[in-house]
Image (cartoon, rainbow, N blue to C red):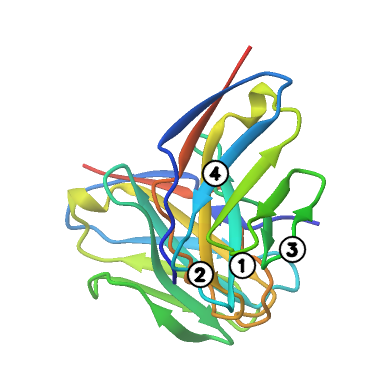
Amino acid sequence: KAGVTQTPRYLIKTRGQQVTLSCSPISGHRSVSWYQQTPGQGLQFLFEYFSETQRNKGNFPGRFSGRQFSNSRSEMNVSTLELGDSALYLCASSLHPDSGNTIYFGEGSWLTVV
Amino acid sequence: DAKTTQPPSMDCAEGRAANLPCNHSTISGNEYVYWYRQIHSQGPQYIIHGLKNNETNEMASLIITEDRKSSTLILPHATLRDTAVYYCIVRVFKYGQNFVFGPGTRLSVLP
């Protein structure tokens, strides 16, 4: 069974631009979360979606947003990109947010802001 | 979620058992211990989790002390491909997907 799929894998953007990242969860998984990983801050939780609703949000500015579609696929968007947004963005999925099942990560999208 | 403490780095000889410790002295009764690892430039990989009993799967064993204040992840026969950062996370079992990752332990398996 296919794992969590993230696209694109690598991208370069310019300061001030916006970016959209996509995540397809494991088949049957309905909960999706996003994480940001940087060398300085490590892995940090961005937000979590279930049934097209945001259930939980980390401590990130409003420039970071996301959504989930009826097929459980998710996108995250970062507007007005800053150099500090350069990071590995990871998507994770699980069957249900409160099922107690573990979360499974994709390979991530590497974003470089120049 | 309870805070965890792990050594920043460890070495292990290839073929030997790798024992990665984790302290979680403030763990509460409904919090589980999870282990993930991250090989360079890849997404974190789930390894194992447990509450109070020792657990074993095809990847590793998890030993939790009786007072639950610490645990050890054991990779029985480490290979070079086990070189990674290992994260110990303590959290309530049913609590959404907000996992709090610390800096972890960088395990180097040496030939």
- Viewer-closest of B28 and B8: B28
Residue count near mark 4 (Cα–Cα under 10 Å), binned few <14, some 14–19, many ≥20: some
Query: Quadrant of residue A103 in the image?
Result: bottom right
Q: Label 4's element?
A: strand
Instruction: Check if mark 2's residue and mark 1's residue have beta carbons within 8 Å.
Output: yes
Residue named by callout 3: B53
Sequence-wise first label, 3 or 4: 4
Residue named by callout 4: B21
Residue named by callout 2: A33
Q: Amino acid at mark 1?
A: Ser
- Viewer-closest of A4 and A40: A40
Front label number (3 vs 1)? 3
Q: Is residue A50 above or below residue A111?
A: below
Q: Label 2's element?
A: strand
Residue count near mark 3 (Cα–Cα under 10 Å), binned few <14, some 14–19, many ≥20: few
Residue named by callout 1: A93
Find the distance from the CA under tag 2 to the CA under tag 1: 6 Å
Find the distance from the CA under tag 3 to the CA under tag 2: 29 Å
